[in-house]
Image: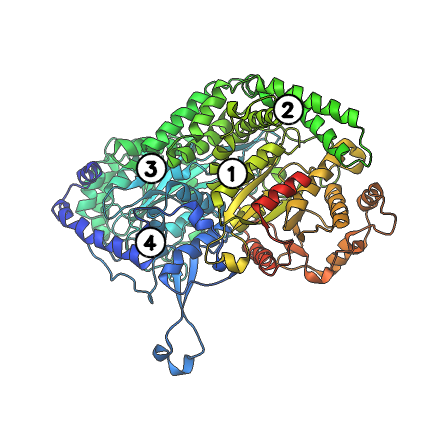
Amino acid sequence: MEGDDCEFHYGEGPNEAQDSDFPIEERSRLQEMLFLLGLETYQTQKLSLQDALQISSDSMKNWAPQTPKDLPWNFLRKLQALNAEARNTTMVLDLPLDTRPVEKESQMEEEIIYWDTAEDISADIYSFSELPTPDTPLNPLDLLCALLLSSDSFLQQEIVSKMSLCQFALPLILPDPENHYHTFLLWAMRGTVRTWGSQPPRVVGSFREDSMVLSRAPAFAFVRMEVSSNSKSQLLNDVLSPSHRQQDCFWHRDLNLGTNPREIADGLVEISWFLPSGREDLDIFPEPMAFLNLRGDIGSHWLQFKLLTEISSAVFILTDNISKKEYKLLSSMKGSATKYYFILSPYRGKRNTNLRFLNRLIPVLKMDHSHVLVKVSSTDSVGFVRRVRAIVAHVTRSPCRRVSVEDMANAARKLGLKVDEDCEECQRAKDRMERITRKIKDLDAYRRDELRLQGELWRKAAQVEKELCQIQWASDPPEKYRAELRHRLLELRMQQNDHGPAWGVQEFISGISSPSLGEKQYFLKWMEWGLARVAQPRPRPPPEMIFTLRPKHCGAVDFSEPFWPEPLGVEHFLREMGQFYEAESCLVEAGKLPAGQRRFAHFPGLALELLLKGLPLELIDGNTLSPPLRWVTGLLKELHVRLERRSRLVVLSALGTPGTGKSTLLNSMFGLQFAAGRGHGPRGAFMQLIKVAESFSPDLGCDHILVIDSGGVITGARTEAGERFEREASLATLIMGLSNVTVVSLAETRNIPPAILHAFLRLEKTGHMPNYQFVYQNLHDVSALGSKPRERRQLLDQPSDVGRATVQMEKQGDGIQTLADLAFWDPEKQHIWHIPGLWHGVPPMAAVNLAYSEAIFELKRCLLENIRNGLSNQNKNIQQLIELVRRL
């Protein structure tokens, strides 16, 4: 194979003759590892994101894995919930009674399984330990590699994105010990987007948000040569950690029992970044920097080491001994522009031999004596880390290479490494995206010329439909006015129907119509990133708006208008398709167009395919803040046909103003894809579908959960905002009215948005009240799950101006001024939750807060328990939901 040829070429030397026997030994070990973890069935049909996210009975259990086959699923659930302990997993073995010690019959025997060892200092590539058995520890780096090898490209991408949020080091080169076809994970890294500050100055516009695949930074590689008494991963963590808090981006042998031998993970290359906050008193370095970590000995993984030397500004080599073989290998690096530094522990090695080889290497690698560092047990660790940081800073101040992950992938291709993004489906999808985005020179002009149905015609049509809806419920509707409105609406729809899809929309439709499901999914991802790249640059807000979930001006301003520009996204192309379908359907209903002449009747089916594969679809148009009724109804009809017998639905919604963390909450609880955490995402409300496992659906009482995120439709407009407030109140009523369960996400006690309180009052009249939970996030004085009685009484008992004004609009009188006065309120049913802040420290280098993950798990369990116990509104089938949409 090509990959094997490349590897043997760079691994030339005395071991070359042994390489012919190596694949046979490794092949069986990989298969045994996959069998041990229960992943062998996913080698032909890869594990998908939908497989990983479906709701099962385990979703309600805070359980520890009992067998190795539980480990992959336990890891995925913890990672989805942004659990800081996802890499440190406990396996509880339930031993048969006859094998337990008599004195411990009532106890479980615990075995600790850790995510990663540091360097396996006793093994080289040709010596193996026994494979783990179900009752012995497993190296969790092996778990990661086995899981990635068993996952499709989109699940791999989700795993890497969640690991990035958790501040874990990311897999960059995935070893395949069976085929020696190591894979550079460029596609898997594509979804990694981070925000960081710059020094100086700290002003609006000095914060940058970018894909880590595209952003260039100096790279520093840390590798081991043969044996090292010093932990390379521990040193990396010390370099990256602020003085007041240890950050373990890379797991290492000094953490608990992290010395379990790796079986299939040697050759793995990980990457992590330092990203500045813009605060000189906190930042270790003034600019972003990449740090790379090769697992295993460079002599056994020469191809990976060769790549690291070509992409890094400096390489730090940790070793106790420099042998003749390693000297020859390093001598071949002559002429490299990379700087080399050695970190030695000479008292454990052959001191004179090391000095002799070092003196020979100094002219070859263009080093001097300052490039050799000594670290022994008596060395001051703080001072040593300070010295390594000083070297890194010195290298970056000098002319040095700055590389992106894309640049690294290009170098990997030249060395013969496989790049995951190079498959035909992915490249065809990328080419189509580039054809579309190449035409986008000016966003406003593109919206006007290519997305023509979303302009003034749609806004006027939405206003007419709103008026028609209002007079429908009037006690004595004026028939003449109703006829005028219908005629006006028909004229607007005819004008829309006179247009055909523009070239860019046609290309988009072709992309999502591909017979290849994989190509369709690749295309949507490429479109998401491509549109983000061509978006007009905006000044970045200060960090309190970027890095936290709390809005800066909670309730302090009049949000009578949307407070951020809506970026161009995939939803705009789908919205255009929806408007073509709406216009055509309206003409068919009015008898102006024969049903047989429809051109766009298949559009809901195309969009449904995306919903079934995990793409959020727009329920409420973010441009007009109106629900496209015919389009949504068409989607639900298609869903009913597709799901057939499994069409029982529960609708779960999350309402709140942008910045209160509702989207992050939903994504972390259920692994969803709602736009979150940036404060400038799509303005519409979106829905996403979650599958319930067939084995669990009889118990839960539904087959799917439809999740609705209110997105940006509720901005917190005051009652005096007039039409804006009325529109938000109507949309909140619509979303809650469709829901079985509603989560109201708030940022401050007593800060219930007027539109949401208004919706509660309206729904109380109808008797259609969902099960509801109030969630307060980012309360800095709350560090654990649970509601405090004092704070709950403040919420319930203290009337606010918002409450009085809202009640007055509903003409309920002075008797109802707070939620506690509403007939449906029962304070003893634990409707109020306090969720700690997501970050522990100052982003972007802050660690995730373990209490956040634990709290959202308890909330998720409560929501599912309420669904199972029938505390929500009666579960619906899709036909009933369609009728409810029409009525509301």
- Quote the CA–CA distance across marks 2 and 1: 24 Å
Indicate the position of residue 544 as horizontal and vertical percent values.
Answer: 63, 40
- Secondary structure at badge 1 equals helix
Helix or strand or loop: what does disc 3 sit on? helix
Q: Which residue is mark 2?
A: 458
Q: Earlier in the sequence, mark 2 or mark 3?
A: 3
Q: Residue 859 at x, y = what percent?
A: 59, 56
The quadrant in which the N terminus is found is top left
Q: Is residue 476 left or right of residue 752?
A: right
Q: Are marks 1 and 3 in contact (CB under 8 Å)?
A: no
**Quick check: marks 2 and 1 in contact, CB under 8 Å?**
no
Which badge, 2 or 1, comes first in the chain's sequence?
2
Instruction: Determine which quarter of the picture holds residue 460.
Output: top right
Q: Amino acid at mark 1?
A: Glu
Q: Amino acid at mark 4?
A: Leu
The residue labelled by disc 4 is 39
Amino acid type indicated by mark 3: Asp
Q: Are marks 2 and 3 in contact (CB under 8 Å)?
A: no
